[in-house]
Image (cartoon, grey):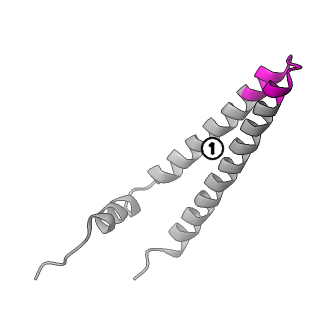
Amino acid sequence: MPINVSAGQRLFLRFWRRPPSRLRQFLDYCSELLSLVGKAAALCAEESHDAVVLDTVSTIEALTVSLERKVWQKITVLNAARESGPAS
């Protein structure tokens, strides 16, 4: 009798069998991109004295740092899940 496996479970099993993890690589790239966006915003404001520009850059930097932190939380969870093995 065939086992009924959902599409999500099939994707998970396909991901789980792939060393090195493409998801981990994707999250690393996301983190790098967010870092570059924050640095680019800081460079744009480097010579500016306009309060609106400075406030916008500050908001962009805060947003990118927050998102980068969330990406690294996902990487930590992913690493912990890979070390513990698949749930039975």
Q: Position of residue 62 (x, y in %)?
A: 76, 43
Q: Is residue 44 above or below residue 61?
A: above
Q: Residue furthest front?
A: 52
Residue drawn at 37 percent across, 62 percent down: 17
Q: In terms of secondary structure, what is the magenta stretch mainly?
A: helix
1 left or right, relative to 71? left
Question: Which residue lies most toward the right here?
Answer: 49
Estimate the x, y position of residue 47 in percent, counting from the top left: 86, 16
Q: Residue at x 37, y 64 (%)?
A: 12
Q: How many marks overall?
A: 1
Residue 7 or 79: which is nearer the viewer?
7
Rendered location of residue 51, percent (x, y): 86, 26
5 shown above or below 28: below
Task: Specify the amino acid type for callout 1.
Answer: Ser
Magenta residue span: 41-54
Nearer to us in this view, 36 or 21: 36
Residue linked to disc 1: 31
Q: Nearer the viewer, residue 72 or 59?
A: 59
Quarter in which the N terminus is drawn:
bottom left
Query: Quick one: quadrant of the C terminus?
Result: bottom left
